[in-house]
Image: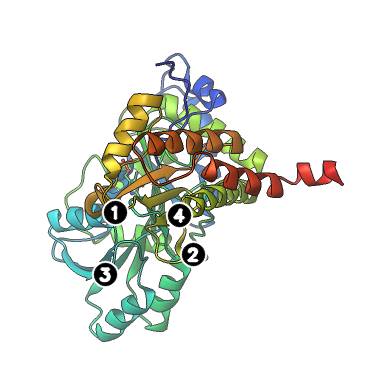
Amino acid sequence: MTGQNPVFIPGPTNIPDRLRYAMSIQTTDHRAPDFVELLAPVLEDVKKVFKTRNGKVITFPSSGTGGWEAAITNTLSPGDKILVARYGMFSHRWIDMCQRHNLDVEIIECEWGSGAPAALFGERLEADKNHDIKAVLVTHNETATGVRSDVGAVRKAIDASSHPAMLYVDCVSSLASMDFRMDEWGVDLAVSGSQKGFMLATGMAIVGVSEKALEACKTATCPRCFFDFGDMAGANANGGFPYTPPLQIMYGLRESLKMLFEEGLDNVFARHFRIAEGVRAAVRAWDMRLCAVSPELYSDTVSAIYVPDGFNSDVLANHVFDAYGVSFGVGLGEMAGRAFRIGHLGSLTDVMALSGLAAIEMAMKDLNYPIELGSGVSAAQEYYRATTGVAQSKAA
Ligand SMILES: *Cc1c(COP(=O)(O)O)cnc(C)c1O
């Protein structure tokens, strides 16, 4: 294999050459006085992506899951009650982690393919007159089902019940690809990582922490050491790290932020929407169905697609890799065997997206799926032609 094909998994994502070069640096001393010149502006710039003014950005050498653990252990105590809905594999895994940390987890079971149930959260909070619930947890973009939830609606539900619970949001597969508004939505802990929207190597958890969450650290008693916010923020403030930082990723992040700001965050979001719409046009042309149950839930970073009855999505994902050397996401949890996923986030163009659609069509045809070769590709082509902007002005 050439290693030149893009991946269509929803993370880790394709790393643009510019970022591979930025991460290709010789070791420098993170205890040298100039480290702070790298670190401080990077942390400040990440705040613009979270859209927070007063929040703090805290990173750890870890994947996104470590960010979850940091968010929980720094702000909660064993036995604390939290409210969370399960509607996919990532919300499921976050619940599991909370239970292992001996939190009292109140779970709202939802259909996979639906999103965060703001109204139900509101009802539970309304009923919680003693304010036992300390936190509401939301997975902004459920990567297993391709569902984006309305975090602003959850905030409104919390406020409408005048409940002091904090709001924790997993934005691992949405930050830097879809709009995220930490301050406006009153998010207290926003958890992300380096290898999805930031287009970098895996190895850095990136957490946005509100002032209220920082305050909660003072009384939270969950055991923590490696992931201690205080240790990290304290060291960062003096231009250092409590242990060895992932230096290459830090340099990569500086360049990634430059790329995002050069394109403009709104343009980044618009590009993700456009590419996703092309993929969704292809799904319709195949006469197949998305896991997301309604259009307002459609994710612009990943599409989970049910295969027709009698077909196994894992066989499809294996075949497209074996035959054409292209990776797609398999079905996770309840979706295993029933759905495959097209990841379309990070560094992606129309041309790349079309190549993925073409490859998966060939694999489907090989496996006798009832589809017309080229049908999805041509639906996406029509959409991309019609919306590129340049083609229309040339034609005019
Ligand atoms: C990828 C992902 C995670 C886990 O991140 P890791 O970096 O693999 O630990 C968590 N939540 C969501 C929604 C994700 O997409």
Badge 3 amino acid: Lys
Badge 1 amino acid: Asp
Q: Which residue is mark 1?
A: 309
Whether residue 170 is visible here, answered yes or no, is yes
In this picture, residue 151 sits left or right of residue 164: right
Q: Which residue is mark 3?
A: 134
Measuring from the top left, give residue 333's x and y in whole percent. Answer: 22, 51
Q: Secondary structure at mark 1?
A: loop
Badge 4 amino acid: Asp
Residue at the image position 47 percent from the left and 51 percent from the top: 283
Distance from disc 2 to disc 3, alpha carbons, whole Å, reads 32 Å
Do residues under tags 2 and 4 come within 8 Å of each other at their CB atoms? no
Circle 1 crowding by C-alpha within 10 Å: few under 14, some 14–19, many from 20: few
Disc nearest the viewer among 1 and 3: 1
Chain-order first, disc 1 or disc 3: 3
In this picture, residue 107 sits left or right of residue 307: left
Q: Secondary structure at mark 2?
A: helix
Residue at far right of view: 396
